[in-house]
Amino acid sequence: MTLHRGLACCLAIAAFLFAAFASPSARAEAMGIALEGFPYPYPVHFMPLTLNGEELRLAYMDVAPAGSSNGRTVVLLHGRNFPSSYWAPTIKALSEAGYRVVAPDQIGFGKSSKPTFAYSFDAMARSTIALIDSLNVDRFDLVGHSMGGMLAVRLARAYGSRIDHLVLYSPIGLEDYRFYVPPVTDEELARRERELSADGYRKQLMTNYALSLPSSAIEPYVQLREEIKESGEYPRWLKSFVASYQMIYAQPVVHEIPLIDRPTLFIMGANDHNAPGRPFAPPELRAKMGQNAALAQALAARMANARVKVFEGVGHLGHLEATQAFNETLLDFLSQ
């Protein structure tokens, strides 16, 4: 029943997003690389900032509690292949439970600016804290998904005194990919991404993320990628996308995870074996990569205050695949 409710919620979100793509007037021009015209579930704001001499802006949603406030704030960090809009069901549940929710698009993603310089988790952490400070938030709970989990680790290490609870939800970076995957050039990464068809991308998401969702649930994001490819600024977007891969590969966080002392919950899908760079690894090493639930268990055992929740039959997008169970687990942990 929980899975069916999750599917129903996700399909409702997909239907909402499809409405935007179905409107001829809304799609009269190609999508811009800042996702102009792409619907978010809550109002989007922008914070100006300067990085490496470039004037940029960071997009974010700041959602107030739906009813009585409990005085607490949750910060949600998105993964690499999705904008922060995909947090819609999580934001709704947290807001209804009395939390203020802040969901940024990191620089290089979603509606935020797309610079072309090399990316770093340190710069992302500083930008995120700058946003939180600008919103007059002192302490907060932190939830990081996929690539956002890697960023959450860096935030927990650098700003741990401000974090009450840490949730690493289907995080990547639970292993050092450099141990398995040789370096890959920017040109090769760009070529592969440029040549990947819509059908190939759809299959990549369904397979790499082991999703228990119908493909229609991710179709808005597949179509979004296709529209971005038609933008005159697509080469800039492509450089940004490549830079994020290189950051994940070259800046491991697994060695820092055992040092985290914040109360930590790993939320994992039993079917999630996502491992960036696996196609570039030697065949004999590929099978060893992406044992994510087991890796989370091993890391939690080395931490001061951590535990693991594994959802059976769930892949990389648990908050969409098993929405009610995910929300209940998250809220229970935050209330402790």
Image (spheres, grey):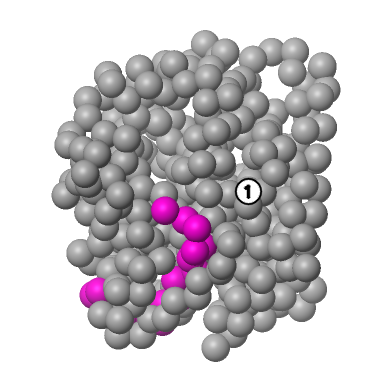
* Residue at the image point whose x is 79% and y is 73% from the top: 67
Left or right for 25, reference 56: right
- Which residue carries the number 1 mark? 86
Q: Find residue 243 and report its horizontal and vertical position in percent.
A: 32, 33
Image: 125 above or below 137: above
Q: Which residues are magenta?
A: 258-273
Image: 156 above or below 81: below
Q: Nearer the viewer, residue 30 or 327?
A: 327
Quarter of the image that includes the N terminus: bottom right
Left or right for 219, reference 308: right
Can residue 189 be seen here? The reply is yes
* Residue at the image point whose x is 78% and y is 21% from the top: 26
Q: Find residue 227 and report its horizontal and vertical position in percent.
A: 61, 20
Q: Find residue 239 and report its horizontal and vertical position in percent.
A: 36, 24
* Residue at the image point whose x is 75% and y is 41% from the top: 14
Quick check: is 226 in the magenta stretch? no
Can residue 35 be seen here? The reply is no
The amino acid type of the residue labelled 1 equals Tyr
Left or right for 109, reference 126: right
Specify the quadrant of the image occupied by residue 276. top left
Quick check: is 271 in the magenta stretch? yes
Element marked by disc 1: helix
Image: 284 above or below 122: above
Quarter of the image that includes the C terminus: bottom right
Q: Nearer the viewer, residue 173 or 107?
A: 173
Q: Find residue 173 and report its horizontal and vertical position in percent.
A: 32, 55
Specify the quadrant of the image occupied by residue 189. top left
Q: Nearer the viewer, residue 63 or 260?
A: 260
Farthest bottom residue?
A: 336
Mark 1 residue crowding within 10 angstroms, few (<14) / some (14–19) / many (20+)? many
